[in-house]
Image (cartoon, helix red, strand yellow):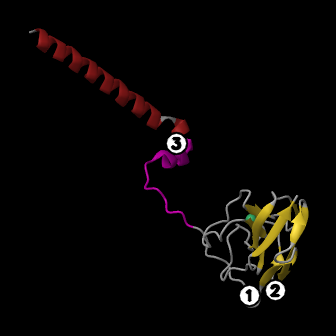
Amino acid sequence: MIDLSRTSALSMNRTTFAVLLAAALLCSCGSPEEEAAPDADAASAPEPAPEVALPPRKPSPEGARVWFVSPGDGAALTSPFTVEFGLEGMDLLPAGEIGEHTGHHHLLVNTPLPRMDLPIITDDAHMHFGLAQTSVELSLEPGTHTLQLLLGDDLHIPHDPPVMSEVITVEVTD
Ligand SMILES: [Cu+2]
């Protein structure tokens, strides 16, 4: 008897809760606010995770190239030193600005080439020059360092084919 009573009480509570919940949902669905904002419903509806769709890589023209105006490969330097970027066959544009055969420089420091189908990450090893700069004052610890230039489009994605320099090595001393 005691068990039945408890079960009954529980059922009542559940039933009461269900009724209240249904009433609340009905009330909510019928409210003018919900009707006025159909996007809110769409946004909260469960949907499969969307595929990340990046735009296709932008083409680079034949003959386009980037290179280090300075320093030269194997240069012995003290920090800070100036790194100058050369570009031919394409034009510089600030990041976010779309043009034909345009992009901005990225300097890779002591790191291999990144993936070519994704935006170039930003960290100490992947420097962006999104204001269309053509040089940088660089300070590196004493030692041997590699440098490479890689052009990226308005979304920081390398072109197809990628426009990149040779890897150069510099020796930084105290
Ligand atoms: Cu960039």
Task: For mark 2, give the secondary structure.
Answer: loop
The magenta-colored residue range is 36-53
Q: Position of residue 39 (x, y in %)?
A: 54, 48
Query: Label 3: which residue?
Result: 35
Residue for point 23% across, 18% down = 10
Q: In the displayed structure, does residue 50 sit left or right of residue 163?
A: left
Query: Label 1: which residue?
Result: 61
- Are the two marked residues, 1 and 2, in contact with CB atoms closer than 8 angstroms? yes
Q: CA distance from mark 3 to mark 1?
A: 52 Å
Q: Position of residue 52 (x, y in %)?
A: 54, 63
**Residue kind at label 2, given as amino acid type:** Gly
- Pick whichever, 147 or 165, lies toward us: 147
Q: Which sits earlier in the primary sequence, circle 3 or circle 2?
A: 3
The image shows residue 46, relative to residue 62, as above or below, that is above
Q: CA distance from mark 3 to mark 2?
A: 55 Å
Q: Position of residue 118 (x, y in %)?
A: 61, 67
